């Protein structure tokens, strides 16, 4: 008989090994899936993981990794602070949208004026937009004890309606022939979040994501507030006794994650996307939840996880085009990654024990 | 352990092979014409993307070995689509069809970087570079026929309409259907729900149910899934029309007819032009006459006289003797849109962002 036995201490080794094993298991079972679909599994896996990094056109895909990964990392870093403390912001997608709307709105208000002040103002407006949107569930939780999971999630749908309304109304491009969508910020140089070095993929969002990783690391490892976050998550009662104010922690964690999600939205709309459109949001806010857990809620882990997720997206699209793999198979492949991670995560706290079946 | 090592070795070998194959393909100047397709939905959506993919397969069959087609489905509009197009161009595509309105700016951005690759953008209006063409179909011609049948079929005098996005193409369709429903039924009212999606079975089903609850016994859709058909079937006594693809699995009722997008002739002609080196930038807007818009079989659920009228209208539109937007027509606010006998020009149709008189609805702002 096989039994699960709780480890006296969570296994450090397994905590670090689980993501790697999950990636490996995904490769094996994903490969089987591809084989069943009649595709060469080795080629498929190589296309997804190798091609974007070291293939013939890596010069194009590597910068794309930064573009795709930066918003994921930025949002996931914010989310991880709350998740560590048991505060669940599920609505980063909405905060991302609001950050984009505030940021783009601030920029477009000045069109066609060119000034060096416009972009910094947009950054502030974007951060504010995301922060405000996250403060709604935060204040409701603190004041009335509402569930932040539900409120933040529902606000995503509200934000989507705002996005549609703005694309069709206030921010609509007056020269857009009656079609929805704002002016393209890529063509408004004061508001354009361009690559810092052309073709490198390094736009301000990437820089800020890296800074966020460093700050989060320092905060969690060295700062009192980081200590409060960790204690609250691991031992809420101990946290209460040690004088940590839970309300302030809720406001900080939700506010910070909203702010970073808002920034991500702002950098996206003013850079790679360029336009406020009805379909501007493509799920970064939700994927970032996976990234946060895949990265073990650790800043460096999140950085790697964000890049890995970006890799599977980019490689997945290449595999679709080159090998004719259906999009659904790629999505299953990505889903496997989270599934195996959660499954293997069990062994951080438990271990398998093999013993002989006892007579009943 | 050996397994892992062997797998790693295979992995390396596989890549090396793939790399050499890639180079040889380029070395011989890739004899096959390579055509890429970027899809906004799934090839199994049963509607818009299915119609494009059917056309891709028809084109592939037409040319056989001379053409290689590739596609990527479920590509989000924005930077993702730009990446996918770039990837296709890098991988040697000679011609790329981008089949959603939201791909407009990305298509032009990528076209600027690959002047030797031809781009064809569906339903857009921007042709910023010589290597970008646009194409679309006059779906409003089919909507006129639907409106006629809808006006005759409804008993509650409430026609439901599931809109995707309030863009001119969709607004044109609503106006065209409404004008022709009113012509045969002065009491008919349209109820419009905006789904803000081209394809989302759950949202479309919800929209259809709400419309049916509000008394609609005909539901028109400008979204691509068959979910509204299923909702109508469940409710019973609700008439629907197939959208983009024939959706014949719901015939003879609730689906009584359909608008079918026929892209294959265009795809074949444009691919041929690339092979011959005669490809030039064009702006195509074809309808029933040119065969880009097909009208699916009108089933026996429609009374014979109505069917005959609908078919007569189809013939008149096809030969150009009738235009669905013929005056006198007023805008919703009562101002004149078209004077008696006046026919709308393409410019007015292309940017249409108002409802016609009589529609009791507001465009989302």
Image: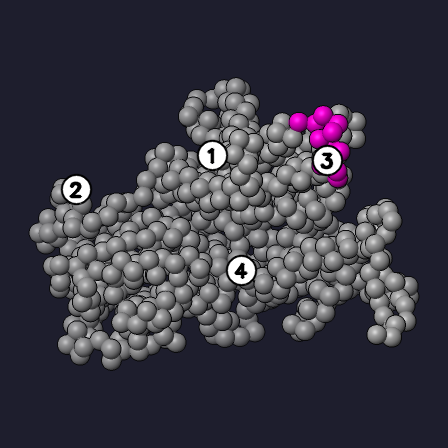
Q: Quadrant of the C terminus of chain A?
A: bottom right
Question: Residue A28 placed where, x, y %?
Answer: 76, 64
Q: Are marks 4 and 1 in contact (CB under 8 Å)?
A: no
**Relative height, residue A36 to residue A244 (above, below):** below
Residue B48 visible? The answer is no
Mark nearest the camera among 3 and 4 is 3
Q: Chain of mark 2?
A: B
Q: Chain of mark 4?
A: B
Q: Chain of mark 3?
A: A
Relative to the observer, which residue lies in front, A173 or A243? A243
Q: Which residue is mark 3?
A: A237
Relative to the observer, which residue lies in front, B211 or A311? B211
Q: Residues within 10 Å of mark 4 (few under 14, many from 20)?
A: many
Q: Chain of mark 1?
A: A
Q: Which residue is mark 4?
A: B73
Q: Which residue is mark 2?
A: B333
Q: Secondary structure at mark 4?
A: loop
Residue at 44% x, 30% y is A105
Q: Which residue is mark 1?
A: A101
Residue A194 in which image quadrant: top right
Q: Are marks 2 and 1 on the same chain?
A: no
The span shown in magenta is A234-245
Question: Residue B237 placed where, x, y %?
Answer: 27, 71
Examine the structure image and report whether residue A88 is included in the region drawn in magenta.
Answer: no
């Amino acid at each position: 008989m096989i039994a699960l036995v709780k480890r006296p201490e969570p296994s450090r080794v397994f905590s670090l090994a689980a993501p790697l094993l999950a990636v490996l298991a995904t490769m094996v079972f994903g490969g089987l899936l591809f084989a069943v679909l009649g595709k060469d599994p080795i080629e498929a896996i190589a296309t997804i993981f190798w091609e974007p990094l070291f293939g013939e056109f890596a010069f194009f895909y590597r910068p794309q990794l930064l573009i795709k990964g930066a918003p994921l990392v930025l949002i996931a870093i914010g989310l991880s602070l709350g998740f560590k403390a048991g505060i669940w912001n599920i609505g980063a997608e909405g905060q991302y949208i609001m950050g984009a709307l505030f940021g783009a709105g601030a920029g477009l208000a000045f069109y066609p004026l060119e000034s060096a002040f416009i972009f910094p103002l947009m950054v502030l407006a974007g951060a504010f937009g995301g922060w405000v949107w996250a403060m709604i569930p935060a204040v409701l939780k603190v004041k009335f004890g509402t569930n932040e999971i539900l409120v933040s999630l529902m606000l995503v749908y509200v934000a989507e309606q705002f996005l549609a309304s703005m694309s069709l109304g206030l921010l609509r491009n007056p020269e857009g022939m009656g079609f929805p969508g704002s002016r393209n910020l890529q063509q408004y140089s004061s508001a354009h979040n361009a690559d810092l070095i052309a073709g490198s993929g390094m736009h301000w969002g990437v820089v800020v994501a890296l800074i966020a990783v460093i700050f989060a690391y320092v905060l969690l490892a060295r700062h009192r507030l980081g200590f409060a976050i960790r204690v609250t998550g691991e031992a809420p009662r101990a946290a209460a006794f040690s004088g940590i104010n839970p309300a302030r922690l809720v406001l900080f964690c939700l506010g910070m994650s909203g702010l970073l999600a808002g920034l991500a939205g702002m950098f996206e709309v003013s850079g790679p996307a360029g336009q406020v459109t009805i379909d501007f949001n493509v799920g970064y806010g939700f994927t970032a939840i996976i990234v946060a857990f895949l990265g073990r809620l650790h800043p460096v882990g999140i950085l790697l996880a964000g890049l890995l997720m970006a890799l599977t997206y980019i490689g997945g699209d290449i595999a679709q085009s080159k090998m004719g793999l259906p999009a659904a198979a790629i999505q299953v492949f990505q889903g496997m990654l989270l599934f195996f991670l959660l499954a293997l995560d069990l062994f951080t706290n438990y271990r398998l024990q093999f013993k002989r079946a006892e007579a009943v | 352990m050996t397994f892992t090592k062997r797998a790693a070795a295979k992995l390396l070998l596989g890549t090396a092979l793939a790399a050499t194959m890639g180079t040889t393909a380029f070395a011989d100047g890739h004899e096959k014409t390579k055509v890429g397709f970027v899809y906004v939905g799934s090839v199994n959506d049963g509607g818009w993307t299915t119609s494009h993919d059917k056309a891709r397969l028809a084109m592939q069959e037409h040319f056989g070995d001379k053409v290689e087609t590739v596609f990527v489905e479920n590509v989000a509009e924005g930077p993702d689509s730009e990446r996918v197009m770039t990837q296709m161009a890098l991988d040697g595509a000679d011609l790329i069809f981008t089949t959603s309105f939201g791909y407009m700016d990305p298509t032009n951005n990528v076209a600027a970087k690959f002047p030797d690759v031809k781009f064809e953008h569906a339903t857009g209006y921007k042709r910023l570079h010589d290597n970008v063409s646009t194409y679309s179909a006059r779906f409003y011609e089919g909507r006129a026929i639907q409106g006629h049948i809808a006006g005759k079929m409804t008993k509650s005098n409430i026609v439901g309409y599931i809109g995707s996005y309030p863009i001119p193409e969709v607004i044109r369709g609503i106006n065209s259907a409404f004008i022709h429903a009113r012509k045969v039924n002065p009491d008919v009212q349209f109820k419009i729900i905006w789904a803000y999606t081209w394809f989302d079975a759950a949202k479309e089903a919800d929209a259809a149910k709400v419309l049916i609850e509000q008394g609609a016994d005909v539901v028109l859709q400008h979204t691509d899934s068959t979910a509204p058909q299923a909702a109508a079937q469940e409710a019973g006594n609700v008439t629907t029309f197939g959208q983009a693809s024939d959706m014949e699995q719901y015939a003879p009722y609730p689906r009584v007819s359909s608008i079918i997008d026929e892209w294959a002739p265009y795809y074949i002609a444009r691919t041929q032009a690339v092979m011959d080196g005669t490809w030039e930038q064009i702006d195509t807007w074809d309808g029933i006459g040119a065969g880009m818009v097909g009208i699916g079989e009108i089933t026996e659920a429609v009374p014979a006289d109505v069917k005959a009228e609908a078919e007569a209208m189809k013939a008149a539109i096809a030969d150009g003797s009738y235009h669905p937007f013929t005056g006198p027509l007023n805008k919703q606010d009562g101002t004149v849109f078209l004077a008696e006998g006046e026919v709308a020009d393409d410019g007015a149709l292309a940017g249409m962002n108002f409802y016609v008189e009589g529609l009791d609805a507001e465009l989302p702002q």
